Image (cartoon, rainbow, N blue to C red):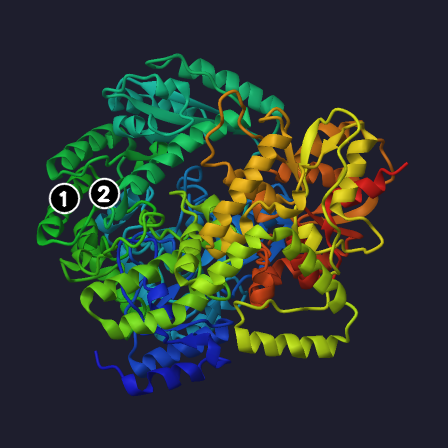
Amino acid sequence: MERKHHALIPTLRRALSSDDQLTERAIDLHAYANDASHFLLTPQAVAIPGNAGEVGALLKASAELKLPLTFRSGGTSLSGQGVTDALLVDVRKNFKDIEVLDGGLRVRVQPGVTVRALNARLARYGRKFGPDPASEIACTIGGVVANNSSGMHCGTVDNVYRTLESLVIVLTSGTVIDTGAADANEKLRTLEPALFDGLAALSRRVRSNAESVAIIKHQFSMKNTMGYGLNSFLDHQDPAQVLAHLIVGSEGTLGFVAEATFRTVPSYKHVTTSLLVFEDLFTANESLEALVGSGAATVELMDSRSLKVGQSLPGTPGIVAGLNVESHAALLVEYTATDAEGLAQRQAQGETLANSLKLSAPATFSPELATRTQLWKLRKGLYASVAGARAQGTTALLEDVVVPVPALASTCAELSVLFDRYGYENSVIFGHAKDGNVHFMLTDGFHTKEQIDRYSAFTEDMVDLILGEGGSLKAEHGTGRVMAPYVRRQYGDELYSVMRKLKTLLDPAGLLNPGVILDEDPQAHLKHIKLTPAVDPEVDRCVACGYCEPVCPSRNLTLTPRQRIVTLRAIETARLAGDSALVAALEKDYSYESVDTCAVDGMCQTACPVDINTGTLVKKLRAKEANKLEGAVWDAAAKHWSAVTRGAGTMLGIAGKLPEPLLRGANQLGRAVLGADTLPLYSAELPTGGSTRARPAPEGEPAAVYFPACVNTMFGPADPAQGGIQESFSALARRVGVELLVPEGIDSLCCGTPWSSKGMEAGGASMAERTVAALRTASGNGELPILCDASSCTEGLRHCLENETVPAGGRALRIIDVVDYTAEYILPLLPQRQKVTSLALHPTCSSTRMGLNSALAQVAEAVAQSVEIPENWGCCGFAGDRGMLHPELTASATEEQAAEVRDFGAAMHASCNRTCELGMTRATGQPYEHVLELLERSTRP
């Protein structure tokens, strides 16, 4: 296909409002070259449109340039439908509107919204989105519609196709059709007559062919995302509705979904869960009809290999941990109800039924959250365990297939035979048993002809197996590139011809996502397979799933954790290939995009299925980049930390007295000379310095050691008339008779986070050694708990202890955040006073990682009648001094949540970490304080 390369960038730019909506930088192209699939294609350009009009203009530009175009949103698709070597259009960063209709019964939503964000909005109405894909934290509505996503619970009843009401579609011609509009059919007939007539002709063709009707009804009686949704021709007669439902599952090959309206489903809060263990797959399979007939909401299968892998996972339930696994299989079963009474009835019925089955051990259902969490950790941990344990440099392929439920056991058994035949070890089988839908993972290098040939032969045998059982080669993940060569084999020549005609009707030039769903090349699925060179043990197990992206504070500014890893792999790949020009181009931008603007907050780890903290990688990279002078400065700071913190506080005090224009000018000049990553930016909302931390020894017997964070010496309280968090917590403790011991030499001690975050290993190690020694002395060799008043510092102190060897006769040091301690030991003893009307609460990344947020909310609710946390809450990106070095990071990270906070109009604003309070103060213009400062004031006698 001829492409007008010389006109590419100027033509695409004319379709967009600003130049920064289009990029051809090497680092951006390679960042977008990866999605969650095992394919890799590097785009020529990446466009980020702001609205449907710009998408239409890009489609016209694509046609003019004869340049293929692929839409990308969450990038969690697994079959290769989100990568391209042409124009990639990112619709994640914009298209975020949600409109709840009819009290939550319906919802109108744009394609950049994640499923989790949509459900958060619907939760207040007791409703949820029908599809429940495992990737709900990161997958977006655009991709969910494009793939006809389903999930663990929704089956074929509440998937996208069944819950869809209407779409706003941008066609390749630029025409916009709202299929829910009263005049949708007339508009379609008038503006797109060939399409209107063509769809009618295809509908007649399909309906008049009895064999075609039988094949379609059989295929779509199961979960099925193979090929186009030809069931639309049978299920709908209204032309606009036929079009809307054909777009569902079309994987971006027929048009762009600018907006979708869905019917929602009830959100069941009451759940009871059990794990039923059987002697073998066949016995488990025999039980499915009874379990599904009893109204089980979820029935998840784990085969014997899954159970063996699960036994190695921490916290595995006893029923699995103590099992001598041979040919066993297990079903994770759940019942749901709208209230506790209904659940109790369901649970009793479920236990009666379960124990009438041929189980290898008695079954007990439990409504306890801890039990449910433990069982789902086992089920979801299978993917993480196999993917995370794969050899360095290998790629993980997660496949999914579906067969009629009666054939499930025999199919799984035959799949296991194929795994053994082709040498794929630890290829566990798990999935949605009530739908006959299972997943399995293959891991291999795909570097050599032998590896590719093995994969090819396995795929052929697997295809024969699934189609021989009357199944579908894709149940949930979409056809993509991986199964495009097999669509004709699954549907036959006639229906394949219908699909080809449909594609031509809607995409005459064949420019929308070519190679996806339909591909005549029988070897297409063996091409462009992702190679993953080893770059660092910390991140080599990354499968590029993208779950980390929605929680990353730099996601809308520079790179995400996934992109930091894959661009590092791109650098290594180019280096191994001898492409020095590409290495230089990537490295030129890598420092700022990846290293300087990473908050190293660890939030990515909370979402990562293979437990990667990309911040740890970034700290290593910072350590490599640090020069000897910087290292010496931070080593010296560790030895004179008292003077450093007092000096910083004093300088802020002086700065507050100087004319701001003079101070800002001098500060900006210094940043220009020394570098933005060296000298922090001063801003007017910064407070004056705080006080020293040293306190006299308590008169009575201490109940705990108190380690006030040094950040409160550098940054004083939001209200200079108040004493700050150290005085507030001390007052709360005195109020209930708790004596606190502040360690000797506290002003020279620190949790070590400033050194850790900058990769200054030597200074950090010496500070940690000194701090731990002081804490061990103050705590009586571990007898007393140690309390800290800044959540990031609490976490930092815990990190200091990770490699400590507990001395003989001593106990492990216990580090507790003051919020947790207050909620458990102080709050119940405080008098109840008048609450403020409302409080905007900002949990921190550290409070989230340490599981403190329930205690934080408990304390906040003791202060305010109403406590509100933004739906778009996330890390503020201030990250110690990162928000002062790179204020654009905090501005980007807080943009959405700050708007929500301003709309709250809350009387008070609180968090649990001083620098996060500063970040949110800057973002919202409202003074944030530690929540215990507010509690202390509200409970004063």
| Disc 2 crowd, CA 10 A, few/some/many (<14, 14-19, 20+) | many
Circle nearer the N terminus (1, 2): 2
Q: Nearer the viewer, residue 28 or 795?
A: 795
Q: CA distance from mark 1 to mark 2?
A: 10 Å
Q: Quadrant of the N terminus?
A: bottom left
Instruction: Determine whether the residue tagged by mark 1 lies in a helix, strand or loop.
Output: helix
Q: Amino acid at mark 1?
A: Phe
* Nearest to viewer (mark 1 / mark 2): 2
Q: Nearer the viewer, residue 906 or 815?
A: 815
Q: Nearer the viewer, residue 153 or 609?
A: 609
177 relative position to 341: left or right: left
Residue 251 quadrant = bottom left
714 relative position to 804: left or right: right
Relative image position of residue 106 (x, y in whole percent): 58, 51
User: Residues at badges 1 and 2 in contact (C-beta under 8 Å)?
Assistant: yes
Q: Quadrant of the C terminus?
A: top right
Question: How many numbered circles does the render carry?
Answer: 2
Residue 918 quadrant = bottom right
- Number of the label disc, if any, that sits on residue 239: none
- Number of the label disc, if any, that sits on residue 458: 1
Relative image position of residue 195 (x, y in whole percent): 35, 71
| Disc 1 crowd, CA 10 A, few/some/many (<14, 14-19, 20+) | some
Q: Amino acid at mark 2?
A: Leu
553 relative position to 862: left or right: left
Relative image position of residue 688 (x, y in whole percent): 75, 60
Residue 773: tell me if it is visible. Answer: yes
Q: Is residue 87 above or below residue 832?
A: below
Q: Residue at x 37, y 72 (%)?
A: 588
Q: Residue at x 34, y 78 (%)?
A: 62
- Number of the label disc, if any, that sits on residue 442: 2
